[in-house]
Amino acid sequence: MSRLVAVSNRVSSVRGAPLAGGLAVALVDALRENQGLWFGWSGKTVDETSQTPTLTREGEVTLATVDLTHDDHEAYYSGFANRCLWPLFHFRLDLTGYDRGHFDAYQRVNQRFARSLLPLLREDDLVWVHDYHLFPLGSELRRIGVRQRLGFFLHIPFPPRELLTTLPQHQTLVRALFDYDLVGFQIEDDVKRLAAYVEQDLGGKVGPGWMEAFGKRLRIEAFPVGIDTARYHDFAFSSHGQREWIRLREFLRGREQIIGVDRLDYTKGLVRRMNAYELLLDSQPDSHGRITYLQIAPISRGEVTAYQDFRRELEQHAAGINGKFGQVDWVPIRYVNEAIPRRRLAGLYRASRIGLVTPMRDGMNLVAKEYVAAQDEKDPGVLVLSRFAGAAQQMGEALLVNPYDTEDVASALERARTMNIDERRNRHQALMRGLLDEDVSNWRQRFLGALKQND
Ligand code: GDG
């Protein structure tokens, strides 16, 4: 059996359950099953880096990490990856920074990653590169002689050609994809957006499952990422989950809870979500004192200015709504930056009548899936989900909303709040069936199966 080598910007410990971050959650099980190697940045910044990775063994998995210099961290990670590609690929031209120096650092770090990884590779390894930090890694590995199978999976959306072409290096970036044996995107719409670019801007050819340009043929497909559905359900009923559920039900004293769980990121639609909740309270006075909204939002990328501004705005918003509607014994919004351990989080989902997931744009969104998996099938809650999350393509039985339309979200909240038990059960049953069929192991088997196949 081939060994799996996963490469991602950040490597985290695989002991216990990862705390946060969709990618880590999706990768760990795959690595455990394949006695894999996980290569990437250690999370440390230093004055001088060494080419030789640090190896750590954690059970079945070997972690290989390299440090970044302060300058590379600033220009490659905070700069090109998070100030340019992240907003651009989430359709936020207004927040996108274009800086050639940052792009150079991005190329340089990818080159360095390739050289550090090379001596660790075995002949029959399958190399699976993850996400937007590492587009050029495949080309860099090929350049230094790597012949192993290389796959690339993009966890975030792929942008329309009209936006992509604002990036001075759009061609270099897309050309890099053609050095992989297989590329996976989250949903069909992402594949179609790349196809339009390949045809119209590169004069290439496109067919089912393939694209041709730069004199090369690329295999590409949508592989919607899933969660470990059955295990997540068990989390919610484990001793930790159960304890949290009981604690929260006691605290709520019959009030119904809306829950939102998001990394603190401007793509997740948190400000507009609070506006929709405010509109619900404005338009439905009978909900006062009967409903409460818990937003869990662990801080991420705190060093990027756009995130600092957005965080301030959000805090003010939550405080404003509490000031406007709050009563001595009722706080309308509880807004929490603390990251909650995974089993406790499952208990919190289970105790919440409504899961509110309204990103403005999202590759997939695992929170939507976790919320559904954590429900009690006898008395399940209702998922309100943005149509602009990749997850909406698979989760049509949720209440799908347009997050730009505050009235739409507010009325979906009211509908969810008053939905009868039969409809809740029917919707939940259909959603759960889909989540069990297309879970994380199915995702990984489909991707790795396709990567192993000959063209
Ligand atoms: C990227 C793409 C795609 C959050 N707070 C806590 C916590 N989390 C966990 C959630 C979930 C994960 O973080 C977030 O995953 P998402 O999918 O929602 O979003 P991104 O982090 O933006 O992930 C996304 C994903 O990659 C996978 O391909 O779906 O579209 O943007 O698992 O539970 N976990 C715990 N405590 C928290 O406080 N334990």
Image (tube, grey):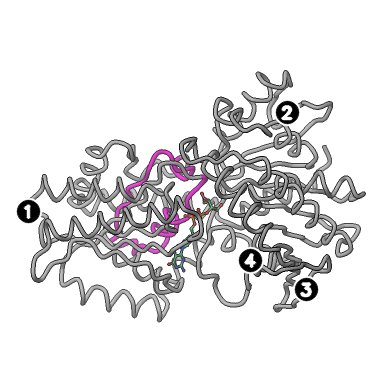
Residue 412 relative to residue 25: left or right: left
Identify residue type, mark 2.
Answer: Met
SS label for mark 1: helix
Q: Residues within 10 Å of mark 4 (few under 14, many from 20)?
A: many
Q: Of the residues under marks 4 and 1, which one precedes in the sequence?
A: 4
Question: How much space separates mark 2 and mark 3, taking CA atoms?
Answer: 38 Å
- What residue is drawn where x is 61% and y is 28%? 165
- Numbered range of the magenta stretch: 363-392
SS label for mark 4: helix
**Label 2 belongs to which residue?**
211
Q: Give the quadrant of the N terminus.
A: bottom right
Measured as percent of width and height from the top left, residue 206 is found at: 70, 23
Question: How much space separates mark 1 and mark 3, taking CA atoms?
Answer: 59 Å
Identify residue type, mark 3.
Answer: Thr
Identify residue type, mark 4.
Answer: Val
**Label 4 belongs to which residue?**
28
